[in-house]
Amino acid sequence: METVNMTDVATQQLWEALQAVKDPEIPVISVVDLGIITAVRWHEQTGLAEVVMTPTFTACPATKVMQEQIQACVATLPFVKEATVTIDFSEPWNSNRISERGKQQLKA
């Protein structure tokens, strides 16, 4: 019998849920496909979900809105007891982070 790693399952569900969060300035693309979500971690012992995001630029006016929407989205998952969203500019965002699906959504 194969063992299921619940952390991997939860992390995948977090990534899937984040597809519903759209960029407020470009609502045809999710924050995932835009490439601003740089890490997602779930801590099984505490139920903490951590999301790390790198906005498209430092003074992005939508950063706070996205941060709140991401936190609210993640908090709706039944296995999440607490959700945090950290802003990280240590590695700047660039357009190479946009997924293929995101590029198609922007073209349309």
Image (cartoon, rainbow, N blue to C red):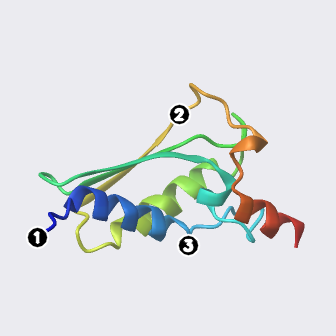
Percent coordinates x, y for residue 78 in the rendering:
25, 74
Establish if 25 lies above or below 36.
below
Q: Is residue 53 above or below residue 19?
A: above
Which numbered disc covers residue 1?
A: 1
- As helix, strand or loop, the secondary structure at mark 3 comes to loop
At a point 24% along the width and 56% down the height, the residue shown is 7
4 left or right, relative to 69: left
Q: Amino acid at mark 3?
A: Ala
Q: Residue at x 50, y 65 (%)?
A: 18
Q: Position of residue 3 (x, y in %)?
A: 14, 63
Task: Tell me residue 65's x, y (percent).
Answer: 59, 57
Where is mark 2, residue-wise? 88
Foreground residue among 79 and 65: 79
Q: Is residue 85 above or below residue 12?
A: above
| Element class at badge 1 | loop
- Inter-mark Cα distance, 2 to 1: 40 Å
Look at 29% across and 63% down and name the residue there.
Answer: 10
Outermost top residue: 90
The residue carrying pointer 2 sits among few (fewer than 14), some (14 to 19) or many (20 or more) residues within 10 Å by Cα, namely: some
Q: Quadrant of the C terminus?
A: bottom right
Which of the two labelled residues, at mark 1 and mark 3, occupies the earlier sequence position? 1
Give the Cα separation between the discs numbered 3 and 2.
Answer: 21 Å
Say which label, 3 or 2, has the lower sequence index.
Answer: 3
CB atoms at circles 3 and 2 under 8 Å apart? no
CA distance separating discs 1 and 3 = 34 Å
Q: Which residue in the rendered view is the most extreme toward the front? A: 1
| Relative image position of residue 14 (x, y in whole percent) | 40, 63
Which of discs 2 and 1 lies nearer the camera? The answer is: 1
Q: Nearer the viewer, mark 1 or mark 3?
A: 1
Asked if residue 82 can be seen in this view, the reply is yes
Pointer 3 residue: 20
Disc 1 marks a residue whose amino acid type is Met
